[in-house]
Image: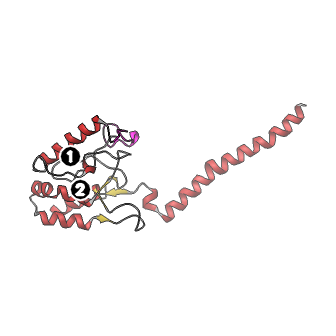
Amino acid sequence: MMSLILNQLRPAAIIILVMTVLLGLAYPLALTGVAQVIFPGNADGSLVHDGKGKVVGSELIGQNFSDPAYFWPRPSAAGDGYDATSSGGSNLGPTSAKLRDLATKRAAALREANGLGPDAPVPAELVTASGSGLDSHISPEAARFQAARVAKARGLPESDVLELIDKHIEGRTFWFLGEPKVNVLKLNIALDKLQR
């Protein structure tokens, strides 16, 4: 009886060991190697470097910019804001009074920061957090909304800032998915280079 059990357990143990080595080690290593060869930038986290070669972030993860001389991203509900370890939305629905109050407060702050009147329209994405809380992109309209503030803070002609925005508009993914967008980190890095 015991030898029968051992005869049945031995192949099961060997299969577990072989599959662990194949699927737990060999497959991930092979996939990582292929990704490094075909998409080296993406496989390394789509890192963004400044003019000196220093890593300043990832083009896939938003960062908090609050200085008036920079473009601001969408608000974040991830942890204390843009915390990749706490990615997630606020889970507030469209009928939530808390969301309405928060959006109203954010809109008023944006109007004040951009020198606009109390009834000026504000892009909805600038007052509501995304599902991940880590959006690295805003719409071209949200970037243009901020152009006058950024130009004034930097002492640049607004037309130069608008031209910079237009140069950084990324098209739809695969030409048909999503909407055109602007990467906030890349735009801000280009803005720093423009002023030099």
**Dot 2, crowdedness within 10 Å: few (<14), some or many (≥20)?**
many
Horizontal placement of 76 versus 11: left or right?
left
Residue 183 visible: yes
**Which is more toward the observer, 141 or 62?**
141
| Image quadrant in which the N terminus is located | top right
Q: Who's the residue at 11% across and 56% down the image?
A: 154
Q: Are marks 1 and 2 in contact (CB under 8 Å)?
A: no
Three-letter amino acid code of the residue under disc 2:
Ala
Disc 2 target residue: 142
Mark linked to residue 85? none
| Range of magenta residues | 78-93
| Left or right, 181 with reference to 16 | left
User: Which secondary structure, mark 1?
Assistant: loop
Magenta stretch secondary structure, dominant: loop
Residue type marked 1? Ser
193 w.r.t. 129: above or below: below
64 vs 37: above or below: above
